[in-house]
Image (tube, rainbow, N blue to C red):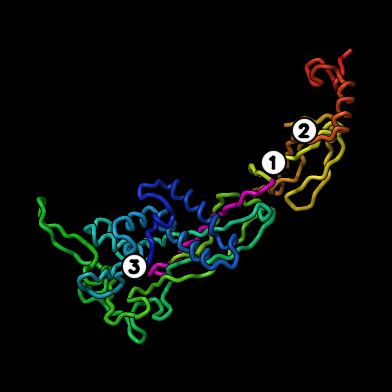
Amino acid sequence: MADKRDFYEVLGVQKSATDAEIKSAYRALVKKHHPDLNPDNKAAEEKTKEINEAYEILSDKDKKARYDQFGHAGVDPNFGAGGGAGAGDFGGFDFGGFTDIFDMFTGGSSRRTSRQAAAPKPVYASCVLTLEQCLAESEHEFDVSVIDRCTTCGGTGAKPGTSPEKCTNCGGSGTVIEQRRTIMGVMQVRSDCPVCGGKGTIIKEKCGSCVGAGLVRKRKKIKVNIPAGAYDGLTLQVTGAGNTTQSGQRGDVYVEVAVKKHPQFRRDGKNLYMNVNLSMTEAALGGTKKIPTIEGKPIEMSVKEGTQTGEVSRISGKGIPDIRRASRGDMFVTFTVLTPTKLSSEQKELLQRLSETFAEDDARAPGKKNGRKKK
């Protein structure tokens, strides 16, 4: 754990950062360092893993609280794992919810018995898409860090060839009953067995791979189908692919989609917007003009005679698929008329002669049409 960077430092946020600030920092870093955007860059791949791990902890209220109080030890699955009694031996550590290690330091205010094991915490991953990739459904593979059963001991936590033994202190129940004297008399209080930590068993010879925990952190690959029309911030759930608890319950992985900005198109929902420049003659005379589409194949669109800067044309069905229904958005083209800046003497003369055919004042002034006074 000593070589791990501070998770707040990894995301570049202060310890007092809000959930929104943490999420915003995470998404910005993912877009910058994601392996899909940095092919054959091992450093970017490792950086992304570090970013995802930091976000997994800081985006979870319970994990963040333990990290803030105990540092990496509070959220590391191999810290203090065990099964027998003894000072500093946290045998009841629940790797799905990471609760008991917190309880040991806070007086047990939130401790739960083994029969009340917490559900596994979710795992978070990220996927960066180009705008073009949002046009069709696609399958993506991710490398995530999860807590899983130790393959050496099969999840028992005991050294291969041995087994956990029934705790003699609680008789295998995992709980003990204490008598406490109160102002209302003597009362019986049921709590986790202090010897086995609520498990009901103890491990005399621990597995060398998981140090008696029965669970280890490892990296695994998962696949997820991303639907057509995916948008920035879309979160997809991969059921049963996340963390595993000691009871065998499997959690989920949540994949958040981030969409890169496009150099030509701006997206708003399922619609696309773009700017197209027109020469002075194209705008004045009209005609047809080739314009790009998100599919990569240009199309010809009509430009009406006398088109002005700021006018918008709509092309139906050339936007992004609607993620909820079988339809596509539209593309809106905003025109900008370019005024020539470098004219030859001959061109200036021609323009001057042309201008003389219009009215002396503004050709587009109110009350005039096509540069001539209305009759």
For badge 3, the amino acid type reads: Ala
Residue 160 position, x and y percent, is 36, 85
Q: CA distance from mark 2 to mark 1?
A: 23 Å
Which badge, 3 or 2, comes first in the chain's sequence? Answer: 3
Magenta region: which residues? 244-264
Residue drawn at (32%, 60%) of the image: 71
Viewer-nearest residue: 198 or 265: 265
Q: Say which mark, if any, is on residue 273.
A: 1
Viewer-nearest residue: 72 or 146: 72
Left or right, 260 with reference to 27: right
Quarter of the picture holding the C terminus: top right
Q: Main secondary structure of the magenta part?
A: loop
Q: Say which mark, if any, is on residue 339.
A: 2
> Residue reaching furthest bottom?
161
Residue 72 position, x and y percent, is 34, 63
Residue drawn at (21%, 76%) of the image: 168
**What residue would you read off at disc 3?**
2
Left or right, 230 with reference to 256: right
| Relative height, residue 213 to residue 103 (above, below) | below
Which badge, 2 or 1, comes first in the chain's sequence? Answer: 1
Q: Is residue 20 found inside the magenta-colored segment of the image?
A: no
Q: Secondary structure at mark 2?
A: loop
